[in-house]
Structures are given as structure tokens and as C-alpha cells.
């Protein structure tokens, strides 16, 4: 039975974060982090260290002995400081440890179930919990697939199917008219994917990609100074990569880098009641985009007059400080007054959002990329021996594909057969 | 009116039927094999060959359980070739051309000689029903045979229609009657049916072929046989001819496409993509200038030639035209035209992993009726149905083959959980544990299981025991101690000087290290015979990969223990999307492991399912 771990507390910045481990290696892995032995059942305050001896954090370590634990297995709980950095560091340590892996959604619950640790009423309540986990995962997958990573993942999928199908065709249709040596094409497909994986794995670029497209909408009455504010924001801190009109003349997008976070600023049409049909269309669009944005900056004295609800986390700033004098929360694109404060406010909120986007997900991707890369590397080595070892090369390739399943989707034998039958005329 | 009673009745004496009847009889229950004619026993209606990749694995597995196909094929084999001989043992598949007449004769002899097995000639027209339970069969002469279990292996006979050009007529095989009444009875069970098609090439008279300029393909010099009990080939060995289609052939076919049954719109059934008609090949791969044809003799004393690669549903005159456009066939005579056949199959997702039909207790389905193609796939299903029918008669638990123990298990699982979209054929790529499911270790995987079940005879049991004693002795010598890289290097084996000590088996896992290389390193190995040496090498080769897969195997086995009742109501699973509910309801997985393989099912969904199962169990107990 594998030992699994996961962040058990809510993600994002918090006072305390709880990482839970369950399985035969739970205690030894926790002890490894603390560099000293732990009681089989109890509570200790310990410093946590990485394998190179550097200090990660200090935390409270709780140990439970099977079967008297939530899952019925040996369990360790690490209560550490809730900073992103600490949690990241500990999670990374655990996923690099032998015999440990990140839990699948619902897996702790499943083990508890299997070991008879849940009563009837608890089971009743599970549906909602798992539903939420599934939904979160589904959303995450959608986010990934909609973005730049989605395009990459789609290419990987295509290339891996092609590579695997070539090997399988040579293996399974050996007595038919198929090539006998497909090594060069398979190798080039695999090294292409490996190259991409390497780039993604270095520096956890995936996380950034997921965050690509944080949208910040500036909303306000016409002539409140939105465009001036946008220009001031862009000119002061941003490296503008592109500027173009939106789908209508009324939404301007400016892509910029705010304290290291890629952000798209939306300058929307001024929101007001009007009889002008065309302007109304623009306003309708502005409201939609503002609703969908990750964060709204309300440039107004009275947020209720705009018809866009202000929700928790949105920012209100008071327009035209240059005309009204320096006031609390005031801003002026013209004089630059309050701009720095707004930038730090926006980036603070967005960093919080970005970390809550899922340390676990990011760590899961990192592990998947590394596993896939290792298996592909092994496949390339084996392929050097030519067709004689295609069975082993195919096995390594299969391992890589399984590791990447969360990114490229499940690739089944039917996908391979489809590719084989469309590439080769078979049937003697 | 005659009445008789058996424990198990098998309807149809093709490859599924014979294997089913033998399996049941080996289990010691009284079995009847009902066939339209004794001539039909073991008839090869398509190409005269057994085995191949994936298929050869199935034959070895059937043999490991003491089935008949392997031994019969060895007696009838007239050309043996081990496919992928140069690749790893996991993907090597034994294949043989078989002499049709010899095969039939050998199968008939095996069948007549089997204890507890009776052959009954007659046409089955209906089942006997006992409420919803199938309790026997009724023959055309109104006689009744009662049985605890009935295994139906009716092949393509369900609403079979044969097409040659625009001419079509009902029939199962050329010259046979389709079973209309039986089809009506099956209809009353309200089973989901689908329609498939398959085709055959025209058969040629070998005496009218000019062989002089044709390329020849010979068998292996050192033939690899199917059965673990066989020691040498029996029939005389032949070679096959190879020729190719050409521009003129393609032109004739293209010009007459509208007259083909398939392209003329006469056929709705789905055909196999790996066995396309020559029309299909030419349409779908228009830029391919030539297609290979194997000219396979149907027997040593039979001048019929099976031209493998040009199955067709074109009219007879066009068949003759295009055949005669091919090199070597300019003057050839067609003995029997090629034809396409359309038939109904039962969506195998309604079957249990025993191949029984819960809608009609007592009835088992095996072979082509379940949407498969190929003799080997049929025989393997026959074996599963035969064993399970016997077990149910004996009041014992069914035997469940898994994806981790056999290709048989892979096939049964694919059929019963995923269903089929085209005639299902085995490929090695279907097996996720391919490196451990090898043709060479089928006996190690399955013979002990067969011994426990009681379907393995004394001869095989004794032979297997002797073989395992030798293997075990050799392996324990090899694992007796470990060697430093320096010691290994000293006997001329090149390994990494990484300081890791390795035992003999670990050294054999290196592809370039052979048993012989270890003779001077490990004392006592000299005494082992060639077969044992080779088997130890094969067992060692994939050790690292098999160990890596072991975790997956264990997880799967654990999940298989959580059974899902057949009547489980997925609609009450809060938290699953309605799409997922529907997919699960259609696939009707029998356990959590199968549910996990249903497309789109996530680990979280499984936990939910498990939770619900647990809750139901508790409610039921309460």
C-alpha cells in the first residue's frame, strides 16, 4: 500500500497549514523531516529540515498509530506555518521521498472507508465533499486546457499517440506490410516532447501559465478617468506586450506584468443608462467582462450606481484626486497619485489568488512532468537498441503516458489502433 | 420423441463450441455437443491459420488449461512461424498454417475420445424454458435435451446474410442455414443487438496458379509449437506463395466499386479495420500502388488456395477479372467466390465475466455471437463459458480471469465492460501487463489454476510439475548469492562498476547476458537442459518491469474485491454527472476495478461509489 500525503487544510495563506500523511511510511517520512524519532502516538514540536539539512519550518507533528486514526493506517499530521513558501517546500520534500505520493482526490476518505473507519452518517455526507473535489479538479483541468498549456498538452498527446502507435504497429502487425524499423521517427517524437517537458518542469512554468490571463477590470462612470488610469498603470510598472481593441470598440485590453504576475487590464465602457443602442451593446459587454474578471477596480465614489455588483476582494478607488485634493482612497491617473498603492493592492490580492489556485495541483504537475520525462528518457535509451527491444520501449512510453494522464487525458488502446489503422493499410 | 438429459449442452461445434464442450467435460460433468453435422466439428471457415500476435498467446493459455486448440493445431500445422522472433519474448506470437482436413479430423478424434462428452447431430430450433431460466434445447425433430446449462456458440448464424455483389441470401456460412427460430427466441430475451460484417476472399485452384516466379515464404527451421505438451511437428511442412496486386487490379476494382455489396449500399454492418476488403484497401489507401497477397494452401492434399489479403464482396465476374490481373494468377480458376457476411451479435456488455446471461439464467454465450472475430478469441471464450457452466452445475464459484493473469482475462474484461465497435480481435497492445502475460509462461500463469479447478489432466499436471522443479532449482541456484561488479567482470560479463551486488537473476535481466555467460560464475548451472535455460532467461528478462507493474496489479486486485451488485442504481449516486452515471449504467461494471476503467470515471467518483456500496451493504445487513 502506498503512503499518500496531501494538504489537508484550505489552500492559500493562513495561520496554520496541515499536511496529512497516511500509510506504512507516514511515520518514518515525518521523522525524516524532523531528523529525529517520533512517538508512535503523540504530539511533538520539531524543526523540519530538507534533505540537504536546510531548515524548512517549525511545526507541530501529530502521530497516530494504525488502526486508531482517521484512515485506519499509520497517520502523521504536520501542522506548519501557513505560508506558501513553507507549504511548498514541505510538499516538495514529501513528493521527492521514496514510496510517497500525492493523494488522489478522495483517497484519504477511500482508505477510511476501506478500513471501516466511517459510520453511516459520515458516508451520507461524503457526496458533497467528493462532488466539490471533483468539481475543483474539473475546473482546474478546464483552466489548464483552455490556456497555453492546453495547446502544448494537445501536441504532446498527438505526438505520444503517434509514437506509441508506431511501436505497437511494428509489434502487433509484424506479419503485415508495416515498416520494421520506426526508431528514427519515434525517437524524434519522444525527444520533442521531452524537450517541452524539461522546459515546463524547470521553474514550474505551468503555474505561471495557469495564471496567464488574470483579468482586472476597471469599471466606472463615463469620464471617470479609467483610460487615464489604465495608461498610468501601464506606463509606470508594466512591460506592455500587446495592445489591441477588444471585440467591440469599447473594451481595451492591456497585457502587463504586475510584480511578476501576468495581468490583463480591461478598460471597459463607462457604465450608465443610455438610449443609444450601440452604446448599450458596449455597456452590456463591459458588464459581462467585468463580471467575469478575477478582480474589479471600481473607480467611483458610489459603487452601487454602476450596475456591477462589488464583491469581496474587489477594490474601490475614488476618481480624480487631482481635482478633489488628496483624500483617503483617492487616485489620479493624471498626477500618479495613489497609483503605487493601487498596484500593490492589486498584486497582493492576485498573489493570494494565485497561491490558492492549488499548490497540490502544481506539485502534482511537477511530479507528473518529472516522471514522464524519466520514462521517456529511458525509452529513448532503449530505442537505441532498435526493434529488438520495442517491447520495452513501448512499456516505458506507456509509463510516460500514464504519468501525463492528468494533462493529456487518458490514451487508450483504441486511440493507438485508430492511429495505426489510419496510417497503415493492414489486413492480409 | 426422444428425451435426454445432460449437465451442459453446447450448441455449435466451431472453435468456441468444441473448446466449451471439452472444458465442461474435463470438469467431469456430462456434456453434449450439438452440431448440424459431424463435418462441422472444428471447421475453419475463414483462413486456414491459427495463432499470431495476441492470438497465439490465447492458444497457449487455452493449452495451459489443458484445452484442445493448441494440440489440434500442432497436429494439423503445415507451416509454423514464430512472429516477432527477434523481438522480446513478451511479444512473440506462435502462428501456424493449418491443414483444414487434418484440423477437422484431429478435432473430431479428440472430441469423440473425450470422457463425459457426447456428440449429437441435429438442428437446434429453440430453448426449453423453465420460467425465465433456460433449461435445455429443442431439436428440429422435436426431441428435447434438458440441461442445467446451455452454451450457445452460434457464430454468424444470427440473421446471417451473405453478399456477393448485389446478390444476397440468408446463411451463416456458405451452404449453411441460418437459425431463424433460435433468433426469435433470443429476441424474446430483449437483448441489445448490433450488426457486424466480415468477408472472405475467393478460393483458388492451386493447380491453375503459376508458382514459378512467385516469392515463397517458408516456415521456421526450428518450429515453435502451440502446446506445452507437443514435442514435434507431425504433418508435412509446406511454404506459402506471395504475390501483389497491381495498377490493373486496382483499376478493375475501382471501375466496379458500385457493384460491390459494401459500396453499393447493401451492407450496414461494421467491418473490422484490421481485415479490410480489397475494395476498402483501394479506396482508403488510394496512393498505395500495390497490396501484398499471401497464397496459403488449405492443406497438404488439398489444392485449394486461400489468397490472404483480397477478401471481397464484388460480383463473381469482377472477382475473376481482378484475380487474373495478378501475377501468377493469370490463368487461375476460382473454386468458390469471395463473399461478405453480415450478422447480428449480442452486445457483450450484458454478459457476466463467466459469459453467462443474467437475463436468461442457465444460458452462456461464446464466440462470434459476442462480437469477436477469430478462432482463438472464440475458443478462449468457449473455454471460459465451458468451465463456468460446469462450475455452476457443480454448485461451485465461477472462475474469474483477470487482466493481470491472462489475455483471456483482458478479452473478457474488454468485452463485458467496453463492448465492441467492430469485430473484436486480440492484439498484444490490449494487455497493459504485456511483459508478464507471455506466450512462454502461459503454463506458469494458468496451469496451477487449472489444476485447482480440476480441468487439467494427469499427463499435463505431471509434465508441468517436472518443468517447474527444474525451473525452481535453477532459479534458486541463481539467487543463492550476490556478486560484486568485479566478480562479474572477472568472468567476462560487462556490467556497471557501480558497487551494486547482483544475483544471477538480476544479471540475466540485462538483455545481453545469457544463461551460458553465467556458467562460470554460478556453480551447478551446467546440468540444466536448453529448455530450462531459455525459460529462466525469459523469466529474468523483464523482472524489473514486472516488479514495477506489481503495484498496479495489486491495486487492481484490491479493487476487484469490491463487487458491485448487478442491479446497482447509479442514478442515486449524488455527486456524479449524469453522463458518468449513464456510462456506468451501460457498462455495468461488476467491481470497482472495472468501474475505474470506464471512460471518464475519476478516483473521486470511485470513492463515492465505494461509499455508496458500503452504505448499502450495511443497510442490507441491518
Image (cartoon, rainbow, N blue to C red):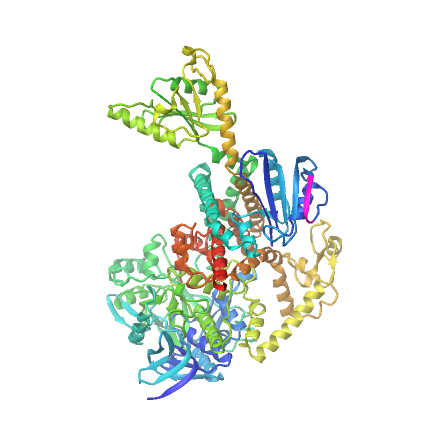
Q: Which residues are magenta?
A: A40-45
User: At 54% across and 74% down in the image, what residue appears?
Assistant: B453
**Main secondary structure of the magenta stretch:** strand
- Residue B269 point in image, percent of width and height: 31, 62
Let me know if residue B566 is in the magenta part: no
- Residue A163 point in image, percent of width and height: 48, 49
Q: Nearer the viewer, residue A149 or B13?
A: A149
Q: Nearer the viewer, residue B259 or A304?
A: A304
Does residue A127 appear in this view? yes
Q: Nearer the viewer, residue A117 or B331?
A: A117
Q: How many numbered marks appear?
A: 0
Answer above or below: position of B113 versus B450: below
Answer above or below: position of A326 versus B394: above
User: At 33% across and 53% down in the image, what residue appears?
Assistant: B286
Horizontally, is B426 left or right of B534 in the view?
left
- Residue B207 point in image, percent of width and height: 37, 74
Amino acid at each position: 500500500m502506498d503512503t499518500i500525503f496531501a494538504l489537508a487544510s484550505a489552500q492559500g495563506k493562513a495561520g496554520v497549514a496541515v499536511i496529512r500523511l497516511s500509510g506504512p511510511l507516514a511515520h518514518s517520512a515525518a521523522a525524516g523531516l524532523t531528523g529525529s524519532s517520533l512517538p508512535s502516538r503523540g504530539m511533538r514540536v520539531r524543526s523540519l529540515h530538507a534533505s540537504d539539512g536546510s531548515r524548512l519550518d517549525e511545526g507541530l507533528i501529530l502521530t497516530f498509530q494504525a488502526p486508531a486514526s482517521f484512515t485506519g493506517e499509520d497517520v502523521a499530521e504536520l501542522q506548519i506555518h501557513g505560508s506558501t513558501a513553507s507549504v511548498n517546500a514541505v510538499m516538495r520534500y514529501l513528493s521527492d521521498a521514496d514510496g510517497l505520493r500525492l493523494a488522489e482526490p478522495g483517497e484519504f476518505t477511500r482508505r477510511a472507508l476501506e478500513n471501516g473507519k466511517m459510520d453511516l452518517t459520515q458516508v451520507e455526507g461524503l457526496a458533497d465533499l467528493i462532488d466539490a473535489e471533483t468539481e475543483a479538479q474539473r475546473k482546474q483541468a478546464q483552466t489548464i486546457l483552455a490556456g497555453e498549456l492546453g495547446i502544448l498538452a494537445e501536441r504532446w498527446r498527438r505526438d505520444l499517440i503517434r509514437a506509441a502507435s508506431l511501436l505497437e504497429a511494428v509489434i502487433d502487425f509484424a506479419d503485415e506490410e508495416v515498416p520494421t524499423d520506426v526508431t528514427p521517427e519515434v525517437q524524434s517524437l519522444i525527444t520533442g516532447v521531452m524537450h517541452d517537458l524539461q522546459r515546463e518542469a524547470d521553474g514550474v512554468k505551468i503555474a505561471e501559465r495557469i495564471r496567464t490571463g488574470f483579468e482586472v477590470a476597471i469599471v466606472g462612470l463615463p469620464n471617470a478617468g479609467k483610460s487615464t488610469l489604465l495608461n498610468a498603470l501601464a506606463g509606470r510598472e508594466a512591460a506592455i506586450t500587446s495592445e489591441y481593441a477588444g471585440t467591440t470598440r469599447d473594451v481595451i485590453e492591456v497585457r502587463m506584468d504586475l510584480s511578476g504576475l501576468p495581468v490583463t487590464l480591461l478598460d471597459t465602457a463607462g457604465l450608465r443608462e443610455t438610449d443609444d443602442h450601440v452604446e448599450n451593446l458596449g455597456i452590456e459587454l463591459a458588464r459581462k467582462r467585468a463580471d467575469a474578471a478575477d478582480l474589479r477596480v471600481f473607480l467611483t465614489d458610489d459603487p452601487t450606481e454602476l450596475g456591477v455588483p462589488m464583491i469581496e476582494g474587489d477594490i474601490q478607488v475614488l476618481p480624480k484626486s487631482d481635482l478633489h485634493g488628496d483624500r483617503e482612497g483617492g487616485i489620479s491617473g493624471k498626477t500618479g497619485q495613489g497609483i503605487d498603492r493601487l498596484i500593490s493592492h492589486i498584486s497582493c490580492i492576485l498573489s493570494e489568488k494565485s497561491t490558492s489556485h492549488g499548490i497540490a495541483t502544481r506539485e502534482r504537475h511537477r511530479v507528473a512532468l518529472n516522471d514522464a520525462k524519466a520514462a521517456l528518457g529511458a525509452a529513448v535509451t532503449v530505442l537505441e537498441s532498435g526493434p529488438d527491444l520495442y517491447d520495452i520501449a513501448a512499456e516505458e512510453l506507456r509509463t510516460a503516458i500514464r504519468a501525463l494522464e492528468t494533462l493529456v487525458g487518458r490514451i487508450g488502446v483504441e486511440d493507438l489502433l485508430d492511429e495505426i489503422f489510419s496510417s497503415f493499410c493492414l489486413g492480409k | 420423441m426422444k428425451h435426454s438429459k445432460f449437465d451442459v449442452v453446447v450448441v455449435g461445434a466451431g472453435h468456441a463450441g468444441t473448446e466449451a464442450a471439452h472444458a465442461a467435460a474435463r470438469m467431469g460433468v456430462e456434456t453434449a455437443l450439438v452440431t448440424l453435422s459431424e463435418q462441422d466439428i472444428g471447421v475453419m471457415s475463414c483462413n486456414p491459420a491459427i495463432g499470431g500476435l495476441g492470438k497465439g498467446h490465447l492458444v497457449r493459455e487455452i493449452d495451459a488449461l489443458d484445452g484442445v486448440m493448441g494440440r489440434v493445431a500442432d497436429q494439423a500445422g503445415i507451416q509454423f512461424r514464430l512472429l516477432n522472433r527477434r523481438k522480446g519474448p513478451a511479444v512473440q506470437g506462435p502462428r501456424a498454417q493449418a491443414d483444414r482436413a487434418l484440423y477437422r479430423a484431429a478435432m473430431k478424434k479428440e472430441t469423440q475420445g473425450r470422457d463425459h462428452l457426447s456428440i449429437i447431430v441435429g438442428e437446434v430450433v429453440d430453448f426449453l424454458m423453465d420460467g425465465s431460466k433456460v433449461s435445455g434445447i429443442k431439436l428440429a425433430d422435436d426431441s428435447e435435451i434438458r440441461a442445467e446449462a446451455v452454451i450457445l456458440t452460434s457464430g454468424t448464424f444470427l440473421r446471417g446474410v451473405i453478399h456477393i455483389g448485389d446478390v444476397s441470401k440468408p446463411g451463416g456460412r456458405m451452404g449453411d442455414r441460418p437459425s431463424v427460430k433460435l433468433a426469435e427466441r433470443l429476441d424474446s430475451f430483449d437483448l441489445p443487438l448490433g450488426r457486424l460484417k466480415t468477408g472472405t476472399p475467393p478460393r483458388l485452384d492451386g493447380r491453375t496458379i503459376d508458382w514459378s516466379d512467385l516469392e515463397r515464404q517458408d516456415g521456421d527451421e526450428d518450429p515453435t509449437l502451440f502446446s506445452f505438451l507437443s514435442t514435434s511437428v507431425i504433418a508435412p511442412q509446406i511454404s506459402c506463395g506471395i504475390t501483389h496486386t497491381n495498377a490493373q487490379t486496382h483499376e478493375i476494382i475501382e471501375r466496379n466499386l458500385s457493384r460491390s455489396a459494401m459500396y453499393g449500399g447493401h451492407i450496414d454492418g461494421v467491418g473490422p479495420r484490421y481485415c479490410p476488403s480489397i475494395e476498402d484497401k483501394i479506396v482508403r489507401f488510394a496512393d498505395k500502388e500495390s497490396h501484398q497477397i499471401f497464397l496459403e494452401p488449405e492443406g497438404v492434399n488439398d489444392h485449394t488456395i486461400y489468397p490472404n489479403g483480397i477478401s471481397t464482396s464484388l460480383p463473381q465476374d469482377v472477382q475473376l477479372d481482378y484475380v487474373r490481373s495478378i501475377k501468377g494468377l493469370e490463368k487461375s480458376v476460382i473454386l468458390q467466390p469471395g463473399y461478405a457476411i453480415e450478422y447480428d451479435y449480442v452486445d457483450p456488455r450484458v454478459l457476466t465475466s463467466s459469459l453467462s446471461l443474467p437475463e436468461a439464467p442457465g444460458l452462456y454465450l461464446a464466440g462470434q455471437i459476442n462480437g469477436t472475430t477469430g478462432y482463438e478469441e472464440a475458443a478462449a471464450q468457449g473455454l471460459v463459458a465451458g468451465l463456468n457452466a460446469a462450475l455452476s452445475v457443480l454448485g461451485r464459484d465461477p472462475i474469474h480471469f483477470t487482466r493481470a493473469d491472462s489475455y483471456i482475462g483482458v478479452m473478457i474484461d474488454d468485452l463485458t465492460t467496453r463492448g465492441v465497435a467492430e469485430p473484436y480481435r486480440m492484439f498484444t497492445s490490449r494487455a497493459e501487463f504485456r511483459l508478464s502475460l507471455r506466450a512462454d509462461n502461459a503454463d506458469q500463469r494458468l496451469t496451477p489454476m487449472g489444476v485447482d479447478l480440476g480441468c487439467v489432466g494427469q499427463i499435463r499436471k505431471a509434465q508441468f510439475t517436472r518443468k517447474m522443479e527444474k525451473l525452481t532449482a535453477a532459479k534458486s541456484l541463481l539467487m543463492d548469492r550476490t556478486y560484486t561488479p568485479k566478480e562479474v567482470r572477472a568472468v567476462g560479463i560487462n556490467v556497471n562498476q557501480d558497487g551494486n551486488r547482483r544475483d544471477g537473476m538480476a544479471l540475466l535481466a540485462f538483455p545481453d547476458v545469457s544463461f551460458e555467460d553465467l556458467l562460470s560464475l554460478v556453480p551447478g548451472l551446467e546440468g540444466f537442459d536448453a529448455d530450462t535455460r531459455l525459460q529462466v532467461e525469459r523469466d529474468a528478462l523483464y523482472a524489473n518491469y514486472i516488479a514495477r507493474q506489481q503495484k498496479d496489479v495489486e491495486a487492481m486486485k484490491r479493487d476487484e474485491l469490491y463487487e458491485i451488485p448487478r442491479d446497482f442504481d447509479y442514478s442515486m449516486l449524488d455527486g456524479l454527472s449524469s453522463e458518468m452515471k449513464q456510462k456506468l449504467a451501460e457498462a455495468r461494471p461488476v467491481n470497482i476495478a472495472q468501474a475505474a476503467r470506464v471512460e471518464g470515471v475519476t478516483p473521486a467518483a470511485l470513492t463515492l461509489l465505494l461509499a455508496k456500496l458500503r452504505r448499502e451493504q450495511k443497510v442490507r445487513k441491518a
